[in-house]
Image (cartoon, rainbow, N blue to C red):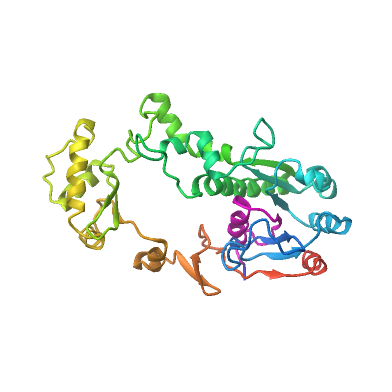
C-alpha cells in the first residue's frame, strides 16, 4: 500500500531544534523515509517532547559525529539519500567534515538543506536567535498587537514553522524534483527571515498602495476593525469574528440584534462605537451560546477553542483533523491526497548497518 506521495524519497534529518523536527514530521507523514541522526549520549539538541508526535515516523540512528566512524556513517547514508536537512549554526557541518562539499562529492544528486534564522551569510549569521527575534526583524511582530502595548507573541508559529518549516519542506521537495530531472543536486539556504518576509507579501502590497498603516491596531486585519477581532463572553471564553464582506457583516448584525442600517461597516469613524456595542453584547452571553446562535450562518463567527477543546469539537472530529497515535491526540497528516494518502507511522531506533541495508 502506498504510504504517501513521497514514498521512495529518502531523507537524512540531523538532530536539531525548531523548524527541522516539524519538517521531518510533516514529510514523514507524506511518505518520506527519514533517518534521523542522533547523539550516542542520548542527549538530543532538544529533549524528545513526544516521540508519538513531533519525532514520529523516523528511523533513529545514533552516531558520534566527532569520530571518523560516525562521519563515515553519515556519508554512507548520504550516498543513498535524496536529501539532508540540518539546522546547525553556519559552519558547524563543515567543521564536522559533513558540509555540502563533502556530501555532494559522495552524491552529486543530493539536496543539502540548511535551516537557520538569519541565513548562511551576513552580519547576523553567527548570532543566536529564536522565532521572536526573526519575526521582530522582518516587521511581522510589530504588526501583531494593540497600539501602546508591546506586541503579542504568536507562539512560535510564524517564524519557526510558517517562515521556517514550510519553506524548508517546500524547498526540499522542489529541489528533489529538480535533481530527478537534471541529475544535479544543490544546497538550499532556508532562513526564517526570508520565509517570514514572503509571508508578509499581501501586507507589503497594501503598504505600497497606502492601504496599510505601518502601526499596530490600525488596520482591517490587525484587530482594529470591530468585525475582525475577538471578544470576551459571559463565561470568560472568547468568540472570534471575521465578517469582512458586507453580506457577512449584515448577518453578524442580525445575530447580534442590531439593525442593519445602524453602522456603515467601513467608516472608521464609527468603529469605536461599533466595537463598544459589540463588546457589550458579546459579554452578555456565553461562548457556547454564541456558537449555537450563529450555527449554520455565514456571519463568520467561531468559538475560540483551547487545544484540548479543538481535539474534541464535533466539526473537527467529523473532518478527522486530529487522530490518536500511541495514545496521543495530534494532527492528521496534511494536506490530503486522493490517490496517495499520507499516514502516521511509529519510529524505531536501529543500528547504522540496518539503516544502510534498508536503503539498499
At a point 24% along the width and 51% down the height, the residue shown is: 299
At which x and y percent is residue 133?
A: 54, 39
At 73% from the left edge and 46% from the top edge, which residue is drawn?
Answer: 112
The quadrant of the image that shows the N terminus is bottom right
Residue 44 at x, y = what percent? 68, 59
View extreme (front): residue: 149
In this picture, residue 210 sits left or right of residue 192: left
Measuring from the top left, give residue 61's x and y in whole percent.
Answer: 75, 64
- Counting every numbered tag in the picture gives 0
Q: Looking at the image, can residue 32 be seen?
A: yes
Which residue appears farthest toward the right when viewing the image? 68
Q: Could you tell me which residue is drawn at 19 percent across and 34 percent down?
A: 270
Q: Name the foreground residue: 266 vs 134.
A: 134
Residue 21 quadrant:
bottom right
Q: Which residues are magenta?
A: 3-28
Q: Is residue 17 magenta?
A: yes
In this view of the protein, can residue 183 be seen by the observer?
Answer: no
Quarter occupied by the C terminus: bottom right
Task: Describe residue 73's horizontal placement relative to residue 248 as left or right.
Answer: right
Residue at the bottom extreme of this rendering: 327
Foreground residue among 105 and 13: 13
Q: Relative to residue 253, is residue 338 depicted above or below?
A: below
State the image quarter where residue 203 is shown.
Answer: top left
Q: Tell whether position 287 is magenta.
A: no
In the image: residue 248, left or right of residue 171: left
Residue 54 position, x and y percent, is 58, 61
Q: Nearer the viewer, residue 107 or 270?
A: 270
In the image, taking residue 88 as reference, residue 136 lies left or right, namely left
Amino acid at each position: 500500500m502506498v504510504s504517501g506521495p513521497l514514498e521512495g524519497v529518502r531523507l537524512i534529518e540531523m538532530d536539531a531544534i525548531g523548524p527541522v523536527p516539524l519538517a521531518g514530521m510533516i514529510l514523514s507523514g507524506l511518505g518520506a523515509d527519514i533517518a534521523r541522526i542522533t547523539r550516542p549520549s542520548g542527549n538530543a539538541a532538544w529533549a524528545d517532547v513526544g516521540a508519538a508526535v513531533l519525532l514520529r515516523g523516523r528511523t533513529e540512528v545514533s552516531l558520534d559525529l566527532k569520530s571518523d566512524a560516525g562521519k563515515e556513517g553519515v556519508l554512507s547514508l548520504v550516498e543513498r539519500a535524496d536529501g539532508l536537512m540540518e539546522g546547525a549554526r553556519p559552519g558547524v557541518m563543515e567543521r564536522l567534515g559533513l558540509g555540502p562539499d563533502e556530501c555532494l562529492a559522495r552524491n552529486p544528486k543530493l539536496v543539502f538543506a540548511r535551516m537557520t534564522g538569519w541565513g548562511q551569510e551576513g552580519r547576523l549569521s553567527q548570532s543566536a536567535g529564536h522565532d521572536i527575534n526573526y519575526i521582530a526583524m522582518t516587521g511581522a511582530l510589530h504588526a501583531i498587537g494593540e497600539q501602546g502595548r508591546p506586541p503579542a507573541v504568536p507562539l512560535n508559529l510564524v517564524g519557526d514553522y510558517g517562515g521556517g518549516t514550510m519553506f524548508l519542506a517546500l524547498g526540499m521537495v522542489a529541489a528533489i524534483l529538480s535533481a530527478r530531472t537534471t541529475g544535479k543536486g544543490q544546497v538550499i539556504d532556508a532562513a526564517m527571515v526570508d520565509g517570514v518576509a514572503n509571508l508578509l507579501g499581501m501586507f507589503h502590497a497594501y503598504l505600497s498602495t497606502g492601504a496599510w498603516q505601518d502601526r499596530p491596531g490600525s488596520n482591517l486585519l490587525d484587530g482594529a476593525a470591530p468585525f475582525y477581532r475577538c471578544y470576551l463572553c459571559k463565561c470568560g471564553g472568547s468568540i472570534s469574528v471575521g465578517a469582512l464582506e458586507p453580506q457577512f457583516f449584515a448577518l453578524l448584525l442580525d445575530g447580534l440584534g442590531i439593525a442593519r442600517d445602524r453602522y456603515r461597516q467601513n467608516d472608521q469613524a464609527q468603529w469605536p462605537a461599533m466595537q463598544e456595542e459589540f463588546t457589550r453584547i458579546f459579554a452578555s452571553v456565553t461562548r457556547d451560546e454564541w456558537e449555537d446562535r450563529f450555527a449554520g450562518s455565514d456571519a463568520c463567527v467561531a468559538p475560540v477553542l483551547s487545544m484540548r477543546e479543538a481535539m474534541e469539537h464535533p466539526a473537527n472530529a467529523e473532518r478527522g483533523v486530529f487522530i490518536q497515535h500511541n495514545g496521543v491526540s495530534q494532527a492528521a497528516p496534511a494536506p490530503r491526497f486522493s490517490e496517495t494518502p499520507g499516514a502516521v507511522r511509529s519510529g524505531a531506533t536501529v543500528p547504522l548497518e540496518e539503516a544502510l541495508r534498508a536503503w539498499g
